[in-house]
Amino acid sequence: MPIRHRAALLAILATVTSLPAAAEDIALPREAQIGPRPFYLVDKMKDGPLKQQLSQCTGPFHKSNFSIGHRGAALQFPEHSRESYLAAARMGAGVIECDVTFTKDRQLVCRHSQCDLHTTTNILTVPDLAAKCTQGFSPADPATGKKASAKCCTSDITLAEFKRLTAKMDGFNAAAKTPEEFQNGTPRWRTDLYATSGTLMTHDESIALIRSLGAKFTPELKAPEVPMPFDGDYTQEAYASQMLAAYKKAGIPASDVFAQSFILKDILYWVKTEPDFAKQAVYLEERYEKEGLDPNKPETWKPSMAELKASGVAILGPPIYAMLTLNDKGEIVPSAYAKAAKAAGLELIGWSLERDGPLNKGGAFYHQSVKSAIDRDGDTLTVLDVLAKQVGVRAMFSDWPATTTFYASCMGMK
């Protein structure tokens, strides 16, 4: 080929390959950057074969679909912010979550709850938007024991108003006398170091960003906290369809999307109307809260695992504690729930590692079934190892995906 033709061809190819996959142009490192935390956790493990194996693992560390960024990297970055998603991707999260809810004008945005703006954004210190909250700020009253409160929902404001807000670390000060004090409530074991200018994300923006980061998607259709149909004719079904339509419009293949919901009817609606997406939709276990599900008492699992599978559910997403129990030696082992799910042919995805904070006192909600076996931060990796090797989870949500990326790379997981 003549040099001039080759040069022209290379120029054309450069133009084609440089076209952005989305409205972002993010430079990521060749390998995952996991930082010091995973090694700190290894140092804090009990002595034994697992600690020995992990202590010899020095990289390189690779992006893994086993590693899901729960709300991004919410341990230290404002959840569902652009900064949180970037951090998760740099830590090697192969899948990143946008919890999806809607604004007053029915636009989809990323928030963990429809009504969490008062704890995850600066809305209470933006007077004209604070005035639109479902419940305005009410100060604490030490004389009566009354705690400070507020309730601000995405459905209270339009998309344009939502975009005026800044994301902050989730938390509030129940003893607050002012809105500013109320918003200063980040738990001590998190940090505000990276929370000075958190950028809120619309659902469409999250799709563009996550695609540009080379990760897959796990949007969760959040349960509305307003009566449905909203505003007269916005039904739950329309909402569920709108979320998946965004991926189709963006040209994202269904195989790259793990749609989630705590509402079984949503999953079954997708089974009926969006079978390609339903193949790997995740039914998030809600029955522990509403129906007193006991991981070791099958009679409390209604529908049964076999019934869930027969209805079209492919992946079940329970909290960590539901998949674990202790044997007669006090060792952490799979629960009857986890065994039954696998026996029925259901895949499992667990939530959420590193959400409990320090484990020196046994953890909290997520480790409640194995609390007596946990006394140090290093037990995070012990729990993860049981979930991966004995329970056989497909993937794990983590508030700090460097930890799950580290484990997946050390164990040679894809």
Image (cartoon, grey):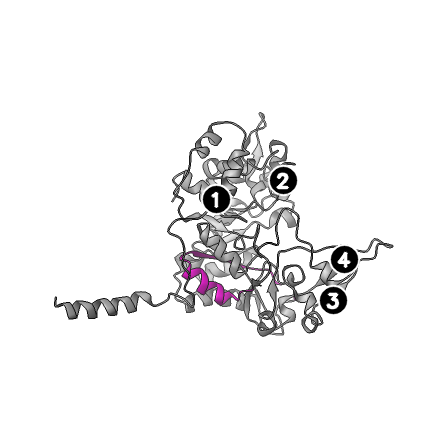
Which residue corresponds to the image point at 75% horizontal and 55% vertical from the top-left? 174
x, y percent for residue 349:
49, 47
Residue range in magenta is 200-226
Q: In the rendered image, which residue does mark 1 sit on?
A: 404
Badge 2 crowding class, 10 Å Cα cut-off, few under 14, some 14 to 19, many 20 or more, is many
| Residue 152: quadrant of the picture | bottom right
At label 3, which amino acid type do we have? Gly
Q: Secondary structure at mark 3?
A: strand
At 50% from the left and 68% from the top, the residue drawn is: 242
Residue, disc 4: 176
The reply to whether callout 4 and callout 1 are in contact (CB within 8 Å) is no
Foreground residue among 156 and 194: 194
- The residue drawn where x is 45% and y is 34% is 54
Q: Where's the N terminus, which quadrant? A: bottom left
Residue under label 2, please give it. 363
Single out the mark in the foreground, 2 or 4.
4
Residue 136: which numbered mark, if any? 3
Q: Position of residue 261 (x, y in %)?
A: 54, 56
Earlier in the chain: of badge 4 and badge 1, it is 4
Q: Give the crowd class for mark 3: few <14, some 14-19, many >=20 residues within 10 Å.
A: some
Q: Can residue 82 be seen?
A: yes
Query: Viewed as shown, does residue 161 lie left or right of 342?
Result: right
Does 168 sit above or below residue 3?
Answer: above
- From the image, which quarter does the C terminus lie in? top left
User: Disc 2 marks which amino acid?
Assistant: Gly
Choose top left, top right, bottom left or bottom right for residue 178.
Answer: bottom right
